[in-house]
Amino acid sequence: MKMGTALLYDDEMTRYKLLWTDPVCKIEVPERLTVSHEALVKAGLAERCVSVPVREATDADILLVHSEEYLEAVKKTPYMTLEDLMEFTLQYGDVYFHPNIYHCAKLAAGAALQLVDSVMTGRVRNGMALVRPPGHHSMRGAASGFCVFNNVAIAARYAKQKYGVERVLIVDWDVHHGQGVQYCFEDDPSVLYFSWHRYEHQKFWPNLPDSDYDCVGKEKGAGFNVNVPWNKVGMKNSDYLSVFCHVLLPIAYEFSPDLVLVCAGFDSAIGDPEGEMCATPDVFAHLTHLLMNLAGGKLCAVLEGGYNLTSLHQSVCQTVQTLLGDPPPQPANLDGPCVSALESLHCVRSAHREYWSCLKHEADPPTSDVSTKAIELAAEGKEKQKKAEEESGAEVAAWLEPLKRTAPPVRSALVLPDGVACPEGCARFSASADPAIVHKLRETFLKDSDDSDALTALSSLTALVQKMEQNEICNGLALVRDVSMATMCVVQHAEAAHLDRVFIVCVGDAVVPSQCRRDDGTTLLVQFSSEESEEQQHRFYIPLCLKKGCSDVSGFTQAALGLVLPLGYEYDPSLVLLVRSAGSGLCDGAWQQLTGLLQGLAQGHTLVLMEEGEEACVGPTASSLLGVAAASLGSLRAPLQDDVKALEGLRRRLQADWKLLQTTAAPEPGRKTEADPARFLIKK
């Protein structure tokens, strides 16, 4: 598959607007599209994408989801008077019509289909469609919430019909519940629909009991509808990433989709008047990255909401730049999920434990009224009333513009012994370090040896880390004779170079030097092995013994998603060191998935160390470092019960120190109990 990213945009979709006064609909404006596209052009991202022309969806396309009666009614709108349009609009909720909206709605749906065509035929790896009107609220026979035709639902049905796609994952990160998508697929086990949305105990639009966590799908589709209700505003990056790590990704990997569709609504970003959330635009780079190894990388993002024109265009740019393969930025403001988010997280995991083996160990659902079910919140109502009565000195959201993301000139550099071929797309790396460094390397590691090859390899390794530190090289791989020695060499060099946090993930039973197991926070070591560690674990040394080592893909994947990723994000390393010892037993697919996922940390600065004898794994590893999506692992069976117990016991012991490991709302003394948007606020 080619490595391109498609971008679909047609300014024809800006040629409709609200023609009368409506306080609800006034925020859905043509500028939503123009500012997003102009930002991509200004950032140089549009020219890096493959421009795909937009076509109109046909009647047959639209009828995949909508009724003929509804389609025929919408067809009449271009010929209606203003008064007729206003009357026609009244039969639907929070939507407006314009003489050109039918044409634009056909273009919006058609753009989603063109994107699916481009991805499924291999013309591109992934892509984004900038469209309006949005689609995820529209239902079989009704417009709703600014949406006329359900673009993503049509695209899912189209992919199944035309390309024989067996399993589609739809990720809806818009701040509103996409009830139209849910109703379309609620009894269909071939489509997994995930949505998080502002809910506030059913007090936020669309005010549906069907939007709550216990609405899991119907009949054969039970378990394939995953709703995460946000019952407070002010949700932050930590809340979003927690739900991905502990709900969406485990279920998605077990489901094993053939195609990922994203209802990419950015009203869930900070500053949006609809969402009132505090997640900054850079988090969408990470959400996108975490989805890119599913379905062999076949990902189609289709614009939905987003009504703050600044955070909208910033979030669009973050998403597209990640689709293009640039390393995600350093994650910001990760201080653990708030208690309200944990309540929702707990409820969702409990509701789905009977359907997904990855959640079978989840705790019982809450028994008190602190759960997400509708309850009277009198105190909150008074607080909102008081806020509404305040004068114009109200506080407004403010945030820093995302830093410019610059991809290093060299993506992947490899330190390889003579005779080992360098995979295509990678640069073979060999460099002589400073004489003083060479002398120190010899004194430290090779006192009683005159092994010039080993000295050359260690010198090249330190030079490679230095190039990564200077952002001249993004990531690297080294095939070394002694992986323990190489690990210690890298850690010592990182310490001398003031790379203050090194996240080490060791796969296999290699002896990791004691210098990498310190408790001062300069390193965080997670080691997968088949043997119990005799060393005392602590906050920064986390051994995980799996019964079958790393050969059980289900257990390994569950640990990678629910333990390694949250730890890595909260630790926020300067460098990721991924170590694979000989005979680890891990299959190439799971190894590639881990390699790909970890590149979301440390701005992509990942160094892989493998022992000589693992030459067969160089190609697959280099492929992941280059940004090629790993092959699907297939539908995962239940992990071994002993491994589940070990993982859960470890997670519970660690969650007091690592907040992103929490999955239940059991606040510690003194811990904040609400999302705190104030940290992002300034006075007008």
Image (cartoon, rainbow, N blue to C red):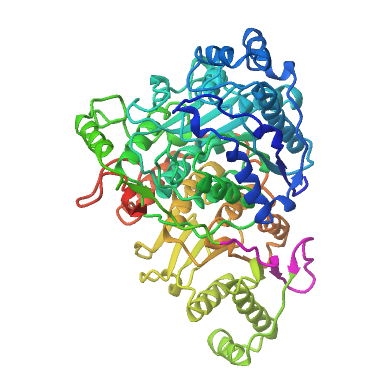
- Image location of residue 79, percent across then percent down: 68, 14
Q: Residue at x 49, y 74 (%)?
A: 499
Residue 595 vs 259, above or below: the answer is below
Is the N terminus in the top left, top right, bottom left or bottom right quadrant?
A: top right
- Tell me: 545 left or right of 581: left
Residue that appears at 65% across and 83% down: 455
Answer with the quarter of the image where residue 37 lies.
top right
Q: Nearer the viewer, residue 670 or 508?
A: 670
Name above or below for residue 143 compared with residue 260.
Answer: above
Closest to the observer, 129 or 624: 129
- Residue 311 seen in render: yes
- Compare residues 82 and 395 and report the one nearer the observer: 82
**Position above or below: 593 against 365:** below
Q: Based on the picture, tell me whether residue 466 belongs to the magenta stretch.
A: no
The residue at 41%/59% (across/down) is 542
Give the percent coordinates (x, y) of residue 99: 65, 21
For the record, the magenta segment spans: 404-427
